[in-house]
Image (cartoon, rainbow, N blue to C red):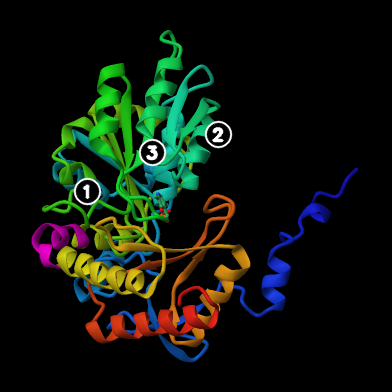
Amino acid sequence: MLDVFGRCQVQDDVKPVTEMGVYPYYHPVEQRLADGEVVVGGRVLVSVGSNDYLGLSADPRLKDAACRAVRLLGTGTAGSRMANGSLTLHETLEGRLAAFLGQESAMVTPTGFLANLVLSALVGPRDTVLADQLIHASLIDAVRLSRARLRRYRHNDLDRLAGLLAECDPAAGALILTEGMFSTTGTLCDLPGTAGLARRHGVRLVLDGAHDIGLIGPGGRGTAEHYGLEPAVDLHTLAFSKCFGTTGGAVAGPEQIIVYLRHQARSMVYSAALAPSSTAAALAALDIIETEPERRRRALAAAARLRADLSGLGFRTETSPTTIIPVYVGDLLLCCRLWRELFDEGVLATAMVPPAVPDGQALIRVSTTALHTETQLDRVAAAFAAAGRRLGLIP
Ligand code: PMP
């Protein structure tokens, strides 16, 4: 028999990256400082690699809520929601999320990844899922698990989506799956166009709001609110690991669908429920999301400033109005070298290489939070200028 362990070698491209000392992953953070800076390898770095856009993960109100929940309910849930892991705290959070998003019902999951995996229960082998090329791995895995046919269209390419919809078998099911705010490019979904096509073809629209819920829209209700199209979204998935400053996820939609998923989604039925601390922290975060819109404005203003600095320096990026700024590099090795140069300059960013991005489209992902100060942003821009010039990426 072939030894399956023997096949498990690290990818070929990891070796040169490691040998050159520019491997950009699994660097443990030793400490997070109050102003959002991090300590890595004993050095204090400005972090522009965080999804904690509202700067809530170290907020005293979230910490207090989490500690109170631990004292009252313990550190774990001791079972799945369906068995004996359900808490009134989960139900409170579900009610609040459903009301916040204007949906009938919601269901909390242990992670955002699992919230998306739940979707595998919605479709089966005869159905087609039409999805944007840039959707997150967890959405792709949900479709794989369901054994539905996955057809992807170029990012926001509505002509192609219309073509794929026209090719669908009217006797089978179909679903459009996309994200409100895309995690690598920071671009928003063309929701008006996508929702229009969904309506015209009588197809349900599912939106992953992991990054945009809490951040985008005047009330923080996401891309759907930004476009005034909340009723057009049939089902929303969420992740608490971004704007909510903790971990966990949720699905929000019609009562009938949530009840169905509670019983049929294997990642819900067979995985232990979200910990009390994370549930309480998410509730405290929702209070802040609903009452402190200035946090969204600060995080977005920081991104607008840094985006202007980086494109002014000659880096290629996007113009989208979000907290994520992709700095396109292209070549994987060059991307890792830029990551390392930034690290040496005191800046912690994120290198995104295939398969997280399409081949040849490696990029440095920069993200801003409500905590970033002008001085920190100056340091980031200066680091990019120095590193980019050394590598010949900018004039
Ligand atoms: N959806 C998207 C768009 C994401 O970017 C991520 C994670 N970055 C997830 C879902 C999964 O969320 P979590 O990390 O909370 O499991």
Residue 222's disc number = 1
Q: Quadrant of the N terminus?
A: top right
* Residue 288 painted magenta: yes
Q: Are marks 2 and 3 in contact (CB under 8 Å)?
A: no
Magenta-drawn segment = 285-294
Residue 166 image position (x, y, % from top left): 40, 16
In the rendered view, tell whether residue 93 sits above or below residue 258: below
> Is 64 displayed left or right of 390 in the figure?
left
Question: CA–CA distance between discs 3 and 1?
Answer: 29 Å
Which amino acid type corresponds to the residue marked 3 in the rendered image?
Met
Residue 348 image position (x, y, % from top left): 44, 78
Which amino acid type corresponds to the residue marked 2 in the rendered image?
Arg
Q: Taken as a whole, is the magenta stretch helix, strand or loop?
A: helix
Q: What residue is shown at x 47% (from left), y 68% (from top)?
A: 350
Q: What residue is shown at x 55% (from left), y 78% (from top)?
A: 391
Q: Quadrant of the C terminus?
A: bottom left
SS for tag 2? helix
> Is 97 displayed left or right of 205 in the figure?
left
> Is 114 displayed left or right of 197 in the figure?
right
Residue 291's disc number = none
Which amino acid type corresponds to the residue marked 1 in the rendered image?
Gly
Residue topped by disc 3: 82
- Residue lying at the far right in this picture: please name it: 1
In the rendered view, tell whether residue 25 sits above or below residue 102: below
SS for tag 3? helix
